[in-house]
Image (cartoon, rainbow, N blue to C red):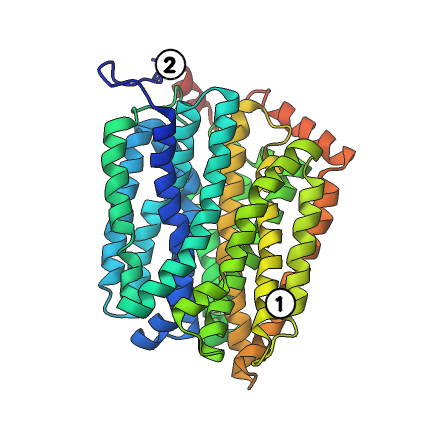
């Protein structure tokens, strides 16, 4: 048969779109909140488990690296095996990983259980968004739903530091993982009751070799950056890791265009707006992840603040993100992506420049203002990333384009923590204080903000829009063919 038709059980009660949206937003709340909760608890984890800076980097990056590598695979699995089913499996894995994280006896086990959490997370947010898009089909209602989805990100950022700080201070860092259990159980039960099962009319083929290459490229790069200071940059192991990452990227470039259903369709990157969106996502989320990582350590280990006060001091960042995320969405809808990207680059660059003067006795009120300014920039950048990524793409490819943009965000988050910890560790090894050691990373953030500015101007130019149109035309042509046998199998399947 040519297709597995979208369907739901004939005996199921009528679909309630708003309830479906609320259930899917529970998964987003849980996964997004997890990042900020863990950052606030890092100093407590370090003291309790005797962890080094590089081990703390792995607590964050083991999670984001797996999510970045498997996001697109999870989308394909949901289309093939059922979106609700994969959503429930992902939620179960995430809860199991959370329980095991709370029981971890040492830092190595905590990192391993974070990987299990990440496996579940890959099946949640992209699949939940797919459920929303396939359930809420009226354009205006769908736009409102996506707006609500974005608002939940800001809410989770606001709740994360407060809940993480309070739980860590009262019950210890292990309790930060308990909060996932009631949310997860509620989402699983409600999904079974109210979300209809659905599959794609034509599920994309799995690409195991492409998936392996993507994971190898990212894992080898992150491992080399994190472990470089400890093992020495010129050691055989580190050089081999960089070489492995480079070889995997070359293999992806050579192999993926030969696939009929590639995991990573390189034709997207012929669009200047799309390529710009991917780089902007990497730069902005690297800045954000490194910012959270270093500031949690600074506020608690240098300034001696409690976990709860740390959460309160970072609240301006979350509030600014909540306010400016929807404003940026409206700005993009009215004036295009350029104004939002200019605001984002300016605000993130200004906050990073202020932090280049950070000292052990800096005024905490100025620091809170800096967090608010950074929140303006980070809140302004999300909407134009997605809009720029799908700009000019055929509607049938918009989902894949958005998925690659989401993957770029996670890649950026992994690199941000890896680079931030590595810079600080390298500077500290030559006698610099923690505060002075962070200055080099803040200058890196200034550079990343400048890149966002340049790409914001470039991606909205007439030349860039013309490249997007040419890339879109490639998807109207026959897809790339890898072998005659694959073509024959596809025709027989039809």
Left or right position of 259 against 198: right
* Image vertical order of residue 34 relative to residue 3, above or below: below
- Coordinates of residue 206 in the picture (x, y in percent): 38, 33
* Image vertical order of residue 11 relative to residue 204, above or below: above
Image quarter for residue 13? top left
Left or right position of 180 against 274: left
Query: What's the mark number on residue 397?
Result: none
- Coordinates of residue 292 in the picture (x, y in percent): 50, 62
Instruction: Label 1: state its secondary structure.
Output: helix
Instruction: Label 2: state its secondary structure.
Output: loop
Q: Residue at x 38, y 65 (%)?
A: 165
Q: Residue furthest bottom?
A: 431
Query: What's the mark number on residue 442?
Result: 1
* Image vertical order of residue 115 relative to residue 103, above or below: above
Instruction: Give whichever of 406, 162 is nearer the camera.
Output: 162
- Coordinates of residue 9 in the picture (x, y in percent): 25, 17
Image quarter for residue 388? top right
Instruction: Give whichever of 93, 376 is nearer the camera.
Output: 376
Cα–Cα span, label 1 and label 2: 54 Å
Instruction: Identify residue for label 2.
Output: 2
Say if residue 231 shows up in the picture.
no
Q: Residue at x 60, y 77 (%)?
A: 362
| Quadrant that contains the N terminus | top left
Instruction: Give whichever of 471, 237 is nearer the camera.
Output: 471
Image quarter for residue 152? top left
């Amino acid at each position: 048969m040519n297709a597995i038709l979208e369907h739901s059980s004939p005996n199921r009660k009528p679909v309630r779109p708003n309830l479906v949206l609320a259930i899917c937003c529970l998964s987003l709340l849980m996964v997004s909140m997890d990042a900020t909760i863990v950052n606030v608890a890092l100093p407590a984890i370090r003291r309790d488990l005797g962890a080094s800076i590089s081990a703390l980097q792995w607590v964050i990056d083991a999670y984001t690296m797996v999510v970045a590598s498997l996001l697109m695979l999870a989308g394909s699995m949901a289309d093939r095996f059922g979106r609700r089913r994969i959503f429930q499996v992902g939620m179960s894995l995430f809860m199991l990983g959370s329980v095991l994280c709370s029981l971890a006896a040492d830092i190595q086990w905590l990192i391993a259980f974070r990987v299990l959490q990440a496996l579940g997370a890959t099946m949640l947010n992209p699949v939940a968004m797919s459920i929303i898009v396939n359930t809420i089909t009226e354009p205006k209602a769908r736009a409102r739903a996506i707006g609500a989805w974005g608002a939940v990100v800001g809410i989770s950022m606001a709740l994360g530091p407060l809940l993480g700080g309070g739980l860590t201070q009262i019950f210890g860092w292990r309790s930060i993982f308990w909060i996932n259990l009631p949310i997860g159980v509620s989402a699983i039960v409600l999904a079974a009751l109210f979300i209809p099962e659905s599959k794609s009319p034509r599920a994309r083929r799995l690409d195991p070799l492409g998936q392996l290459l993507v994971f190898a490229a990212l894992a080898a790069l992150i491992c080399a950056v994190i472990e470089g200071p400890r093992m020495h940059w010129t050691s055989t192991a580190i050089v081999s890791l960089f070489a492995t990452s480079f070889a995997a990227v070359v293999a992806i470039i050579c192999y993926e265009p030969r696939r009929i259903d590639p995991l990573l369709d390189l034709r997207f990157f012929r669009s200047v707006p799309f390529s710009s969106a991917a780089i902007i996502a990497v730069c902005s989320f690297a800045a954000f992840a490194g910012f959270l990582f270093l500031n949690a350590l600074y506020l608690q280990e240098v300034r001696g603040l409690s976990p709860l006060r740390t959460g309160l001091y970072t609240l301006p960042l979350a509030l600014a993100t909540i306010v400016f995320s929807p404003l940026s969405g409206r700005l993009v809808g009215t004036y295009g992506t350029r104004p939002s990207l200019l605001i984002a680059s300016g605000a993130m660059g200004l906050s990073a420049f202020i932090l280049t003067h950070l000292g052990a006795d800096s005024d905490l009120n100025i620091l809170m203002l800096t967090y608010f300014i950074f929140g303006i920039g980070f809140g302004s950048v999300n909407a134009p990333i997605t809009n720029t990524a799908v700009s000019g793409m055929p509607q049938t490819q918009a989902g894949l384009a958005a998925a690659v943009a989401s993957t770029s965000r996670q890649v950026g988050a992994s690199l941000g923590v890896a680079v931030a910890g590595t810079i600080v560790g390298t500077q500290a090894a030559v006698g610099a204080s923690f505060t002075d050691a962070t200055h080099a990373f803040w200058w890196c953030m200034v550079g990343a903000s400048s890149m966002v500015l340049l790409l914001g101007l470039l991606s909205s130019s007439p030349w860039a829009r013309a490249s997007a149109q040419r890339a879109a035309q490639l998807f109207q042509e026959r897809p790339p063919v890898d072998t005659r046998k694959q073509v024959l199998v596809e025709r027989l399947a039809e």
